[in-house]
Amino acid sequence: MFEPIKHNLETIAGVQIYPILSLLIFFLFFVGLGLWVFSYKKDTINELSNIPLKDQ
C-alpha cells in the first residue's frame, strides 16, 4: 500500500532530514510545554481553576 509513496520519497534528494526535523520540533514543543506547566505559579492555577465556580 505504501510502496508508491516510499518509492517517490526515496527519489527526493535530502528527504531524510524531514523525519529528524519533525521529531525535533515535536520533542522541543513538549519539553517547552512541560517547562511552562511546571514553572506556573500555584496561586495562578488555583485562581484560574475557581473561575467557573464564581457566582456572577
Image (cartoon, rainbow, N blue to C red):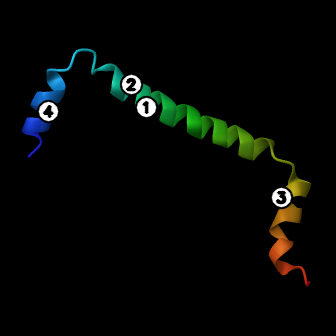
**Circles 4 and 1: CB distance less than 8 Å?**
no
Mark 3 element type: helix
> In the rendered picture of this protein, how many numbered marks are placed on residues?
4
Vertically, is 4 above or below 37?
above
Q: Which mark is residue 31?
A: none
Q: Is residue 5 rendered to the left or right of residue 43?
A: left
Residue 2 rendering spot, x and y as whole percentages: 12, 42
Question: Furthest-top residue in view?
Answer: 13
Residue 32 rendering spot, x and y as whole percentages: 65, 36
Earlier-in-chain disc, 4 versus 2? 4
Q: Which mark is residue 20?
A: 2
| CA separation in Å, label 2 and label 1 | 5 Å
Q: Which mark is residue 45?
A: 3
Q: Which mark is residue 23?
A: 1
Query: Which label sits in the foreground, 4 or 1?
Result: 4
Name the residue at 66% across, 42% down: 34
Amino acid residing under circle 4: Lys
Amino acid residing under circle 3: Ile
Front one among 10 and 32 = 10
**Circles 2 and 1: CB distance less than 8 Å?**
yes
Vertically, is 41 above or below 9?
below
Amino acid residing under circle 1: Leu
| CA separation in Å, label 4 and label 1 | 19 Å
**Residue 10, quarter of picture:** top left
Q: Which mark is residue 6?
A: 4
Earlier-in-chain disc, 1 versus 3? 1
Residue 45 rendering spot, x and y as whole percentages: 83, 58
Image quarter in which the C terminus is found? bottom right
